[in-house]
Amino acid sequence: MNWRRLNNVLHRDIGYLAVGLSIVYGVSGLAVNHKADWNPSYRVGKTIRQIEPMRATDREGMVREALGKLGIDQAPRNAFRPNPDTLQLFYREATYSIDLPSGAVVIEQARPRPVLFEVNQLHLNTPKRIWTLVADVYAIGLVVLAITGMFVLKGRTGITGRGAWLTAAGVLMPAVYWVFYLYGP
Amino acid sequence: MRRAMMVAAVLLVCGGVVLSAAVKKYGKPLTLKETTKISAIFAQPDSFNGKRVKVQGPIVDVCEMKGCWIAIASDKEFQSIRFKVDDGVIVFPMTAKGLTAKVEGVVTVSTLSEEEQIAQGKEMEKEMKKPFDPKTVKGPKTVIMIKGEAAEIE
């Protein structure tokens, strides 16, 4: 097997292996790139309800009373009073903040976005541990893909022809941007 | 041979996903055996400043944008302490609210001027999308938090 055949086999097979992760990182990259404008992992919502005002008593009694007034059967994971006038009830995907004197209830919901939540967790390496190794191997795979990709074709469209110009453009683009970023207006 | 290599690679990727899904430990392992009451830290913040502690309590808030901090309720009412990690070191899920956290880190006590509080409040307003009124800031404020890199959530 000559070197170009080996190069092309490597490029092809690493490319196949990288398809899944490239989609994961690509989709998640788009999502988290705009996180200033939206929450890419959670669908966050807020609703307001009104119940009868409540008196501050012991916490367990207040939780029972609040659940009755809200018509909720399920016990919360936990309850907390951040201040004397507020009772918070925590559920997996919702937090109820009750203003005791007025009875105003703010319900904050945070539901993981299907698919996006999972791909963002992987992209941001939330699991750590073995995923760090997988992500490292993938990153090395991308470098190998980039290098072998330059030598897949020979001739006019290869790295000695059009490929040289396109490769140079691709290398210059981040370099020029960085200089502009540092010294530009 | 090539088929075997491909199967091994797929198994490696799938194994990683499965193993990761069961993890409830975040960051480095907890090392301290003794648990400090959060109320004790609030009672004598200066004596804990710079000390490494392990605390435990229900999670009552989570950083919405980056998952880079959680607030843990104290054993006393109306108290909670923020556990902050460097961005990306740990990403706490928003669905962790109400679960119990054990965290370990170094207590930091600092005093924020009015200007710093207003700047921080505006930042939080943007991050948490909760309204902030600068008029609520009255004088310097002592901020107690734990900066760490180890947590367990159950």
Image (spheres, coloured by chain):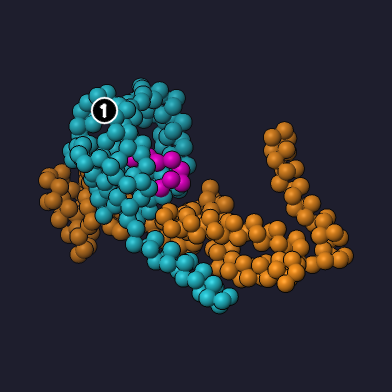
Residue B60 visible in image: no
Q: Nearer the viewer, residue A14 or A94?
A: A14
* Amino acid at circle 1: Phe
- The span picked out in magenta is B82-90
Name the magenta segment's main secondary structure: loop
The C terminus of chain A, quarter of image: top right
Query: Label 1 lies in what chain?
Result: B
Q: Residue at x 27, y 48 (%)?
A: B101
Q: Work out whether B36 lies above or below B142.
A: below
Number of numbered discs on residues: 1
The N terminus of chain A, quarter of image: bottom right
Spot occupied by residue B79 in the image (x, y as percentages of width and height) = 24, 37
Spot occupied by residue A86 in the image (x, y as percentages of width and height) = 24, 44
The shade of chain A is orange
Q: Work out whether A116 lies above or below B85.
A: below
Q: Residue at x 43, y 63 (%)?
A: B16
**Secondary structure state at the residue bearing disc 1:** helix
Side (left or right) of A33 relative to A89: right
Rate crowding at label 1 as few (under 14), some (14 to 19) or many (20 or more) other CA atoms within 10 Å. Answer: some
Residue A95 visible in image: yes
Spot occupied by residue A27 in the image (x, y as percentages of width and height) = 56, 62
Q: Residue furthest front?
A: A1
Q: What residue sits right under mark 1 in the picture? A: B48
Q: In which quarter of the image is residue B84?
A: top left
The shade of chain B is cyan
Q: Residue at x 38, y 57 (%)?
A: A110
Q: In which quarter of the image is residue A114?
A: bottom left
Q: Work out whether A135 lies above or below A58.
A: below
Side (left or right) of A83 relative to A43: left
